[in-house]
Amino acid sequence: MFDLDRFIADLRATLPERSRQPMKEVVARAIADPAALIRRVGEPDKAGVQVLYKSPELTVLNLLWAPRQITLPHNHRMSAVIGMYAGREDNVFWRRVPDSATHRIEAAGAQALSTGDVALLGPDIVHSVVNPLGKISAAIHVYDGNFLEIERSMWNAETLAEEPLDINAVVQGMSVLEADRR
């Protein structure tokens, strides 16, 4: 059985570690039994962001990607752990173009995450996400800071120039929900 309070406590216990590998291991344990996780957070039936926990040091989200949803390139400015428990998400990683006055980016790699996969993203990563499936994809996203209240950037889809983050443009209509902590 997935215990959200225990999961949060285990994540918080990893925060003093210099490496985020222990945090990745906690997320891997949580998604190892997708059915138990789904019983606690709900069946992934519509796109949205469910806030499971937030504090100045830690943010935990249940991210539900719509079928074939695409996000613009964006940064986190903090480390992130992504644990897929349903479906798939394809991440395109971007790097800054040297000496670019507009802070443009170019594609630098990719990683497909399927159910059961866990990825650790460093604080400087810029990525975009695609759900290539015709169904909802679901993942636990853990950030080692207050992800919801930090200034971040996104990159214009046409010009690939850096702009202030417009969360509505990034998630394109996903709803943000507070978790029911019962």
Image (cartoon, rainbow, N blue to C red):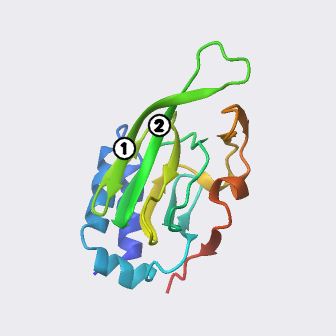
Q: Residue furthest top?
A: 99
Snapshot quadrant of residue 109: top left
Residue 49, image x and y in percent? Answer: 57, 68
How busy is the neighbourhood of tag 1: few (under 14 within 10 Å), some, or many (20 plus)? few
Residue at disc 1, secondary structure: strand
Q: Is residue 91 left or right of residue 25?
A: right
Q: Is residue 150 visible?
A: yes
Residue of label 1: 111
Residue 20, image x and y in percent? Answer: 36, 43
Residue of label 2: 93
Snapshot quadrant of residue 36: bottom left
| Amino acid type, residue under disc 2 in the picture | Phe
Q: Is residue 2 visible?
A: no
Location of the N terminus (image quadrant): bottom left
Residue at disc 2, secondary structure: strand
How busy is the neighbourhood of tag 2: few (under 14 within 10 Å), some, or many (20 plus)? many
* Mark 1 to mark 2 CA distance (whole Å): 8 Å
Q: Is residue 3 left or right of residue 176?
A: left
Question: In the rendered view, would you say 122 is above or below 141?
Answer: above
Question: In the rendered view, would you say 33 is above or below 22?
Answer: below
| Amino acid type, residue under disc 1 in the picture | Gln
Instruction: Evaluate if marks 1 and 2 touch, with contact meaning CB atoms under 8 Å apart.
Output: yes
Question: In the rendered view, would you say 46 is above or below 115?
Answer: below
